[in-house]
Amino acid sequence: MVMVSSVVRLLLMVQLLLAMAATDEALDTRYYAATCPDAEAIVRNAMERLHYTDPTLAPALIRLLFHDCFVRGCDASVLIVPTPRYSSDRAAVPNHTLRGFGAVDAVKRALEAAYPAAVSCADALALMARDAVALLGGNRYDVALGRRDGTQSNPWEVDLPAPFARLDDVLAYFAARGFSAEETVVLFGAHTVGGAHCSSFRYRLTRPDGAMDETLRCDMLDTCGAAELPLDTDPATFFDPDTPFTVDNNYYAQLMSNRTLLQVDQEAATHPDTAPHVAYYAASPDAFMQRFSEAMAKLSNVGGLEGDAGEVRKVCSRYNN
Ligand code: HEM
């Protein structure tokens, strides 16, 4: 059984690496110049409206892109709704707290109204995440376009790290997708926006690991309580309570003072491969802003489908047929 799952993982990794190599060459910032010249403007206008109605959406969309791109590449597989007939990525545990699906559907409707069947959901999500970063005060970056939407989405392929994963394993996992330890630390910086449900870190409150600031631990016990609650009553709290809707380097200062919620993030402050990067970005706000946008652009290019592969979904939450 262990052997079979190792072989499946190996095959998936080879598939991902092959797709990565292919995608880098084929994507193009002017991909929709003829078929949907306003695509970027349509997405930006919709994102601005959504952001002013609900500022918590932008962090959710950045996370959605990560969960899409690191599983089968950026192919919008994370958007498929599970049905009684077939399951999908969304049924996997790491995806239970994902949000923003309604926003993607709304943006896709706006794109379909202007240019039917032109823009893929994978491209729409990549553009939405880029705009989310910019709306949260991050640097704007170019997004190469031309991704196609996948026709497979399987919960058993979702191997995203847990919040209690060991950092050694997480660094290997990111490296398998082409990200160095430095880039991994930079992407972790996304945890400067948005927040987490108590279920992701409550065990650190009741069984102290010695790596969480005692004042934060007591505050979080007040917020979360000591007992597990069902997901729908599971409180959520901001990663960076001072500026939860601003992309900035506060996250690294929090790491260095043991004031972060997730165990895996905290380990980055002391692991020999990541600690120097954490210290550097804590002291270098401009460098972080630049590298964060570069890392997000790279994240948007992981794997995926192009050319005639896959399809352009009409509705992002379901396959065309
Ligand atoms: C080892 C890697 C990672 C782990 C274990 C992890 C885990 C988590 C967890 C547990 C949450 C809270 C979910 C909840 O309880 O609602 C979260 C939130 C978030 N994550 Fe990560 N994450 C990782 C990497 C990343 C990366 C690479 C990005 C983006 C580049 C990212 C972006 C976010 C954002 C923006 C949120 C806030 C979402 C919201 O407010 O809805 N994460 N992450």
Image (cartoon, helix red, strand yellow):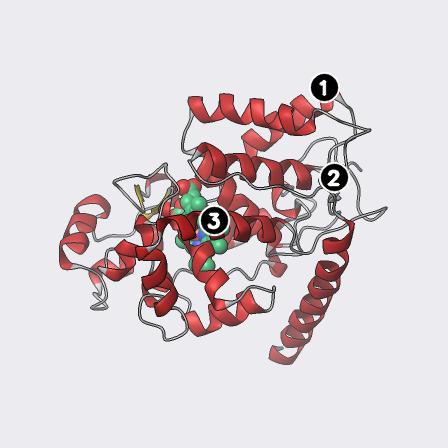
Name the N-terminal-most of marks 3 and 2.
Answer: 3
Q: Is mark 2 within 8 Å of ligand 1?
A: no
Q: Please, what secondary structure does the residue beneath circle 1 have?
A: helix
Q: Please, what secondary structure does the residue beneath circle 3 have?
A: helix
C-alpha distance separating marks 2 and 1: 18 Å
Q: Which residue is mark 1?
A: 113
- Identify which residue, 33 or 257, lies in the foreground: 33
The residue depicted at 18 percent of the width and 53 percent of the height is: 216
Q: Label 3 is placed on what type of residue? A: Gln
Q: Label 2 is placed on what type of residue? A: Tyr
Q: Which residue is mark 3?
A: 290
Q: Which mark is residue 319?
A: 2
Measured from the top left, where is residue 270 in percent x and y? Answer: 31, 71
* In the image, residue 293 above or below residue 40: below
Q: Label 1 is placed on what type of residue? A: Ala
Q: Please, what secondary structure does the residue beneath circle 2 have?
A: loop
Measured from the top left, where is residue 137 in percent x and y? Answer: 42, 36
